[in-house]
């Protein structure tokens, strides 16, 4: 299946993000994240989002996917994503299977080029959360996610423009995470039809 790509991601982009993406990207930092699907107690499908801990940085206290910077010791972005999943949530690489990589995305505020992977867990995952990095784990029902509509808020941009957001499990999800989720939602809907 072909990927919807940047055009789908941009449906959830703040106005300022669209403008920043038009500029040239020189030597970005590299990162990798995982959207990990797993089976709930009653057989329903969920995926994990996290709320990052507070720290002096642009993504402090934001909702995102498990993941982080690619280290020189990581063989590939996939290896980095699995390592980060282990470090942040305590889910081992033996518990997960990669589905595919989706469209990478540049995040201007932190100057990161992010590789995003879809994966699933065949077994029950027991979390061991690193509280230095993760303030909260958010389990999102796939059924809720598929039926969610974007909404807008004017609280996130200082220039008065409204930012598109998803409200998932009572959390405002915006920026790069919402952009990646827009592509994931499009892929799932396409696969189901």
Image (cartoon, helix red, strand yellow):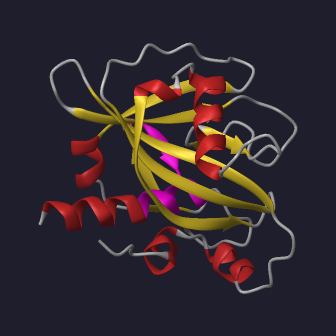
Quadrant the C terminus occupies:
bottom left
Q: Position of residue 118 (x, y in %)?
A: 42, 49
Q: Please state the horizontal and vertical placement of residue 117, each as a whole percent of the image.
A: 49, 51
Q: Is residue 58 visible?
A: yes
Q: Is residue 114 magenta?
A: no
- Above or below 37: residue 181: below
Residue 83: name its quadrant: top right
**Relative to 102, residue 6 above or below:** below
Residue drawn at x 86%, y 76% is: 26
> In this view, which residue lies farthest toward the front?
75
**Which residue occupies the foreground of this view, 131 or 172?**
131
Residue 17 locus on image (x, y percent): 67, 73
Q: Residue furthest left?
A: 193
Q: In the rendering, at what x and y percent does residue 13 appear?
A: 56, 70
Image side of residue 103 versus residue 142, left or right: right
Front position in the image: 73 or 112: 73
Q: How many numbered circles are shown? A: 0
Residue 98 sits above or below residue 127 on the image:
below
Residue at (19, 31) in percent of width and height: 44
Q: Residue at x 66, y 50 (%)?
A: 76
Q: Quadrant of the N terminus?
A: bottom left
Residue numbers of the magenta segment: 169-182
Q: Would residue 181 be counted in the magenta stretch?
A: yes
Q: Between 139 and 127, which is closer to the camera in this rendering?
A: 127
Q: Quadrant of residue 60?
A: top right
Any part of residue 135 in sight:
no
Image-based side of 10 in relation to 68, left or right: left
């Amino acid at each position: 299946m072909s990927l919807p790509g940047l055009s789908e991601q941009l449906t959830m982009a703040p106005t300022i993000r669209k403008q920043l993406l038009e500029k040239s990207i020189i030597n970005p930092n590299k990162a990798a994240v995982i959207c990990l699907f797993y089976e709930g107690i009653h057989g329903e499908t969920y995926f994990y989002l996290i709320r990052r801990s507070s720290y002096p940085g642009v993504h402090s206290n934001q909702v995102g996917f498990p993941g982080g910077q690619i280290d020189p010791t990581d063989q590939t972005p996939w290896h980095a994503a699995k390592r980060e999943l282990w470090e942040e949530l305590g889910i081992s690489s033996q518990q997960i299977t990669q589905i595919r990589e989706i469209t990478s995305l540049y995040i201007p505020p932190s100057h990161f080029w992010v590789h995003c992977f879809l994966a699933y867990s065949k077994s029950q995952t027991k979390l061991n959360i690193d509280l230095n990095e993760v303030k909260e784990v958010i389990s999102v029902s796939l059924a809720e996610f598929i039926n969610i509509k974007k909404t807008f808020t004017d609280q996130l941009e200082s220039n008065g423009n409204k930012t598109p957001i998803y409200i998932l499990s009572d959390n405002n999800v915006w920026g790069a995470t919402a952009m990646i989720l827009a592509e994931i939602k499009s892929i799932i809907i396409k696969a189901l039809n």
